[in-house]
Amino acid sequence: MNTFVTLTQQVINGLSLGSVYALIAVGYSLVYSVLLFSNFAHGGFLVIGGYICYYALLTLKLDIWTASLAALVGAGVSAIVVERLAYRPIRERTPVTLYMLIASMGMSIVIENLFVVTIGGRFRALPPVIPMTPVRFFGLITTSAFDILSLITAVVFLIGLQVFLVKTKWGLAIRAASYNLRTAGLMGVNVNRLIAIVFFVAGLLAAVGGIFLSVRYTLYPQLGNAITTKAFIAAVIGGLGSLPGAVLGSIILGLAEMLTAGFISSQFRDLVVFGILIVTLIIRPTGFFGKSVSEKV
């Protein structure tokens, strides 16, 4: 019975963590599906959202809803600025996406060091605005209100993204661009505006994940690096450029981390995650939902 209770608790925790990873991995995959490169600066948007929420709560004394909205908008706008300054000039000069990949690595370091230089690199904890109270199911299984809330929030945002992609004009344009950006432009789509929307959505989703991860762990400038790696692994496992694949890969990672921590040791979490990545690449290099495309990087 104790093993069953522990297993159930870790599964719930894993689904919660995996759903937060999914928000970040989906934004990562969304950019990849349109621009055909891996944006390693994506974790920077997560950190930007976390810090905006932190200072909005502590300095401006805003409530969590207003602070979160400010964080989402701020991270989305920051993503647009990064695309405009770092990626668009390269994209307009050459079709080789490798150069944008290199630029994204540079932007990741720039964002991280901007925070280190301006506000310092110490760890910060968000105020206790998100409930952490225990929740019991059937008198046996105990989890936290935070895990339930993060899972529900992630599901709501992922459903909202799906509705946006399926039901709106720009969602249709994004899906068309994911097949061929050049053809979408020839059909009358404003490519620059479309890419700005994609980056805004990706930054917004990253900020949601950043807020929850800042509460689960702590907030510091390097947080985005570790999470970007997890998002990349999730995207690779699910299939680069596939949004359902990114969600599936994230859930697998979340469950793997929590089950490893619960039944083996938390020290083996990353070992298991990277082991899953290697096994996936050996058995199915394109991931569960990926397509074999040679020019993407």
Image: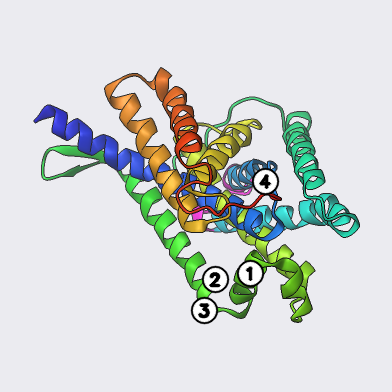
User: Residue at 49% of width from left, 34% of height from top?
Assistant: 282
- Do callouts 2 and 4 mark residues in contact (Cβ within 8 Å)? no
The residues tagged by marks 3 and 2 sit, at their Cα atoms, a distance apart of 6 Å
Q: Give the range drawn in magenta.
A: 56-65
Q: Is mark 3 on a helix, strand or loop?
A: helix
Query: Would you place residue 80 above or below residue 21 in this image?
Result: below
Q: Which comes sooner in the sequence, label 4 or label 1?
A: 4
Q: In this view, does 293 lie above or below 234?
A: below
Q: Which amino acid does label 3 sit on?
A: Lys
Mark 4 Cα shell of 10 Å, populated few (<14), some (14-19), many (≥20): many
In which quadrant will I find the C terminus?
A: top right
Which residue type carries mark 1?
Ile
- Which residue is label 4 attached to? 38
Is residue 70 at least partly visible in the picture? no
The residue to which callout 2 is attached is: 165
Per the image, the residue denoted by label 3 is 167
